[in-house]
Image: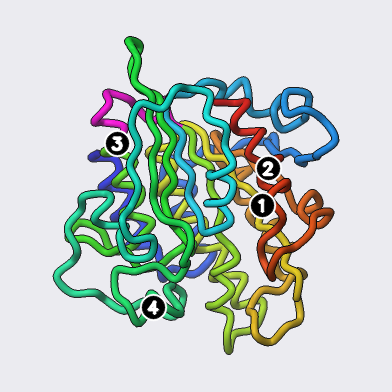
Amino acid sequence: LKELAEAIEVHRLMKDLDESEYLNRFHRHRIVFKDLHNECFFREDEPPQNGECYKMLAPEVKSKKAWFFFGDSQMGKYFNALDYPYIITSKKETDDLRCGFLDYVHLPRSEEWVYPQYNQGPAKFGRKNHFCSDVASAGNRRFESDSTEGSNFMELLTVDFASDVEQQTRYTNTTQETATLHVANQLQLRGLTYEDSVCVVNVGLHDQKLCESKSDSHCLVIYVTNVKVYLNLLYNVCGSIIWLSTTPVRDTHNPNYPQRNDRMEIMNEKIREVLAKFDNGYFVDVWERALGNTFVDNAHFTQDFYDNVAGLFSSLM
């Protein structure tokens, strides 16, 4: 917890640094650079255990006790499709999908909700409704299995931006800090360490709401810088960090939506490069698999896509 507090302080100090100074400090703060790029392409045409993603991840994460999933409604759909391999003995869900985050994690609200900076969310609903999320259909939840060998559990936490101030507490300034503190608390409560945990992460779709009135290059710098700080926080509580690539959208030139596929492909490549600098980071590319699926709205797909991707993680649990 002391290391986590130090990381949160670094997070606060580094938010406004330019890119070169940020990288310099980022390198010094517990990051180990590696030569190998731990990445894989998820494909549908093979059982999970035969695929390159399973073979990459299994030696590091197979049968870990604590699995955390961080993201928006897309991550929620992956989570809901999981076939958990243990008998569930208890579960917990937030009472309010949009505004129940802090009640769920049992952390006190900040006395005053501080508005976001230009490079932070929320951008829509959460900006007008304090301590609520922009995303409407995710919601925190946890499923747990108790046995004589201890508990295994998986948990979904709604984090819809790389940096946002939706869930501020007396101890934290951002949702990312709050989620990290919650993970640390859950591990400590069960006598576990970061080595027992796996974190599956994605943000990207909602971050493009911050691109309004900004150039694509400026928008990209904001996103990548925020992700670096976010990952640096997670590094303190996650034994392994698995980043799922952001998926394409259907209407890539619709003025009613901020998402652009050409921009998101670049975003994915940049995060692939960032993650390669972590000794515990893995990049799972689902972009091409998603393109081959049927959309049900601008950003979401038919259920078989989520079932396929969730099958990979179910087989690793």
Q: Nearer the viewer, residue 154 or 227?
A: 154
Can you tell which of label 3 and label 4 is closer to the viewer? 3
Q: Residue furthest top?
A: 148
Q: Residues within 10 Å of mark 1 (few under 14, many from 20)?
A: many
| Label 4: how many Cα within 10 Å (few below 14, some 14–19, many 20+) | few
Q: Is residue 242 above or below residue 262?
A: above
Q: Which residues are magenta?
A: 187-197
Disc nearest the viewer among 4 and 2 = 2
**Nearest to N terminus: mark 3 or mark 2:** 3
Taking the spot 49% from the left edge, 39% from the top edge, the residue there is 199
Q: Could you give the CA–CA distance between mark 4 and mark 2, rounded to whole angstroms?
A: 31 Å
Asked if labels 2 and 3 touch by Cβ distance under 8 angstroms, the answer is no
Q: At x 63% / y 79%, what residue is drawn?
A: 258
Q: Secondary structure at mark 2?
A: strand
Q: Which residue is mark 1?
A: 245
Q: Residues within 10 Å of mark 3 (few under 14, many from 20)?
A: some
The residue lying toward the viewer, choosing from 222 and 80, is 80
Residue position marked by numbered label 4 in the rendering: 117
Callout 1 touching callout 2 (CB < 8 Å)? yes
Task: Specify the quadrant of the image occupied by residue 182.
Answer: top left
Question: SS class of the residue under badge 1?
Answer: loop
Proximity of marks 1 and 3: CB atoms separated by less than 8 Å: no
